[in-house]
Image (cartoon, helix red, strand yellow):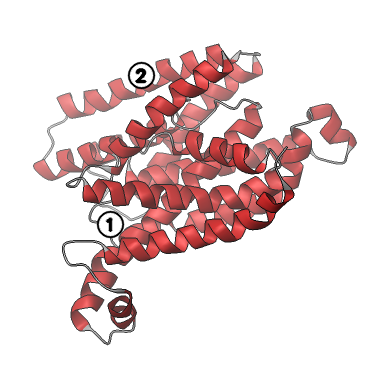
Amino acid sequence: MTPPWVHRVAFPVALLLLGLLALTSLAVGDMRLSPARIVSGLLHRDELAATILWNIRLPRMLVSVMVGAALASSGLVMQAYFRNSLASPGLLGVTSGGAAGAVVIIGLGWASASIFVLPVAAVVGAMFSTSVVIMLARRGASTERLLLAGVALNALLGAVTSYVLANFTLSYERNARILFWLLGGLEDRTWEHVFMASPILVAGALLWPLGRPMDLLSLGSREAQSLGVDTKRLRRSMLALSTVLTALATAVAGTVGFVGLIVPHLLRLLVGPEHRRLVPLTLIGGAAFVLACDLISRSAGGLRVGIVTSLIGGPFFLWLLRRQA
C-alpha cells in the first residue's frame, strides 16, 4: 500500500520536475542561456535570446509537453478501457494508424492545403486502428491475442507506409517529412505545430473529471452501473479522447512509442491505482518524460526522440512481460 505522504507530495514534486525540465529545455542548445537571460529573452529585453526562445526553443518545448501529456494519458485511458495493464496506443497499433493516415496525406500532397488536413488524417487513421482493436476486444480477446493483433496491425500499417514510399513519385521534401513521421521527432517545431496540438489541452481538460468514473469502471461494468455510472457513455468518451489524443500527438511529432505504456505504469507503482490521482499525474508525468527524452536526444547528437523512447520502452516492455508471466 502506498504511504499517505507519497500522495501528498506526488503532485507538487511532479510539477516541480516538469518546471525544471521545461527551464532546461529552454536553456540547452548550441547557445546555452542562463535563467536570467531566458527571462530577458521572454520579455524581449535581449533580442538574440528572444529570437532563439520565441522562434525555436519555446515552440519545441510546448509541443514536447503536449505530446507527452497526450500519449501518456491516452495509454492510461486504454488500460482502463480494456482493464489491461499492457494496453497502450503504440502496442495496439493506434499510433501506427495515426502515422499511416498522415503519411498517405503527405504522399498525396494534400498536407499543405490546410493546417487541419494532417491532424484530421491522423485521427481517421487512428480511428481505423481503434475500431479493429475494439472489435477484437468485444469478442473477448485475451491479452495475448490483443498484443498479437497489435503486432499484425502495426505490420499492415507499416506496409501501407512502405507502399507510399515505394510507389508514389515524391519530392525530396515529402520523403523527408514521411521519414520524420516514421522516426518521431521534435526538431523544427514551430508555432503552427503548437496550434495544431492545442486541442490536446481541451482533451486533457475533458479527461480530468473522468478519474472517479474510471475508478468505478475498474470494479466492473455492472458494479459501475449500480453506482450511477453510464458505462456506455463513459466508454465512448474514453475511446474518443484516447484516439484524438494519440492522433494529435502523432500529427505533430510522428511515431513516438512506449510513452503510454511507461508513464502510467511507473505512476501506478508510485501512487496506486486510483485514477483520480493518476489522471493529473499522468498528464504531468508524460510531459516531463518526453521533455527528458528530448533533452537526451539533443545531447546525443540529434538522436530522434522516438528512438530514445523506444530504447527505453523496449526493455521496459520485456520487463513487464516477465513480471506478469
Q: Amino acid at mark 1?
A: Arg
Residue 184 figure quarter: top left
Give neighbour class at mark 1: few <14, some 14-19, many 20+ (Cα, 10 Å): many
Foreground: 309 or 224? 309
Query: How crowded is the residue under tag 2: few (<14 C-alpha within 10 Å), some, or many (20+)?
Result: some
Front disc: 2 or 1: 1
Can you say which quadrant of the picture contains the C terminus? top right
Image: 244 above or below 31: above
Element type at mark 1: loop
Q: Residue furthest right?
A: 226
State which quarter of the image contains the N terminus. top right
| Residue 254 in the image, given as x and y percentages of width and height | 32, 41
User: In the rendering, at what x and y percent does residue 44 appear?
Assistant: 28, 84
Percent from the top left, x then y, of residue 8? Answer: 68, 56
Residue 211: in sight, yes or no? yes
In the image, is 251 to the left or to the right of 167?
right
Residue at position x 34%, y 79% from top? 39
Q: Which mark is residue 156?
A: 2
- The residue sitting at 66% across, 14% down in the picture is 140
Instruction: Point out the tag, 2 or 1, that comes first from the N-terminus.
Output: 2
In the image, residue 108 sits, relative to residue 142, either above or below, namely: below
| Tag 2: amino acid | Leu
Q: Quadrant of residue 146?
A: top right
Q: Secondary structure at mark 2?
A: helix
Quarter-of-image position of residue 38: bottom left
Q: Is residue 102 visible?
A: no
The residue indicated by pointer 1 is 189
